[in-house]
Amino acid sequence: MTAVSPIHPTAIVDPAAQLHPTVSVGPYAVIGPQVCIGAHTKVGAHTVIEGITTIGESNVIHSHTALGGVPQDKKYAGEPTRLEIGDRNTIREFCTFNTGTAQDGGVTRVGDDNWIMAYVHIAHDCQVGNQTILANNATLAGHVHVADWAIIGGLSGVHQFTKVGAHVMAGFASHISQDVPPFCMVDGHPLAVRGLNLEGLRRRGFSAERLAVIKQAYRLLYRSGLTLQAAVEALDNLQGSCEAEAQADVQLMLDFLQQSKRGIVR
């Protein structure tokens, strides 16, 4: 009995591309010479993967997706920049991910276990962590960072160089043009903080003790009337009085505030 090839006969796969033998490629897909794809990844029909693109294991890439295209940046002059995608991601129809630029680190990264819905755009130099959800038509401009477990609602736009913290939930059609600290729930245009993503944290196993400290941190930052500098000092004091796990949560908040360059939504 003749073995059936996992690569459809109408697909165009450059001989120089590196595909694990277990990779499946659907009809009319096009895969370029500098593409590397790991074991058990599925590439849907009419998908185009080009550029210097590395894709890990067990990803499911649905039809008509375009990965590894050149940056939509007028400064781009053909430099050999990259796109790197981790393991176990779901990438739905018509998504577009671009490679990086020489003006940043030269690489766009998407981590592991992300759920990326249809028509999502991830622009040059974006850094997307693990376990995120990007709903339909979410659009990340260049140099955006999205941390682990963040959720960005459908039709939301994220301004270039903006950072979205871990465990953030941004509602439908959010206009995100300032950095969003970890654990917060935001939405609107203009963007506003609506509270903490408590339900999401509970689902991820945060204890009542950790949640209590996160609530204290939130109140210091958003409900105390303190200046940002005074709130940071108060958070530093709070951290010193916490148990180890809660200390890490407060440190996550402090690190984010100290690294923010666009200013936080407040």
Image (cartoon, rainbow, N blue to C red):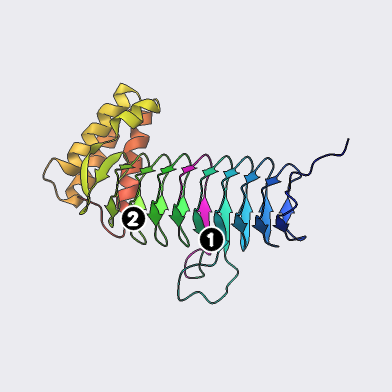
Q: Is residue 265 left or right of residue 89?
A: left
Identify the residue at the far right of this view: 1
Q: Which residue is mark 2?
A: 157
Q: Give the percent coordinates (x, y) of residue 172.
A: 30, 45
Separation of marks 1 and 2 at Cα, in angstroms: 21 Å
Write down the quadrant of residue 152 in the picture.
top left
Magenta stretch: dominant secondary structure: loop
Residue type at the position of mark 2: Gly
Task: Quarter of the image for the N terminus: give it.
Answer: top right
Which residues are drawn in magenta? 103-118
Q: At numbered mark 1, what does the secondary structure look like: helix, strand or loop? A: strand
Q: At numbered mark 2, what does the secondary structure look like: helix, strand or loop? A: strand
Q: Give the percent coordinates (x, y) of residue 156.
A: 33, 51
Q: Give the percent coordinates (x, y) of residue 121.
A: 44, 56
Write down the quadrant of residue 224 in the picture.
top left
Please indicate, yes or no, whether residue 170 appears anywhere in the rendered image: yes
Mark 1 Cα-neighbour bin, 10 Å: few <14, some 14–19, many ≥20:
many
Please identify, in this view, whether the residue under mark 1 or under mark 2 is nearer the observer: 2
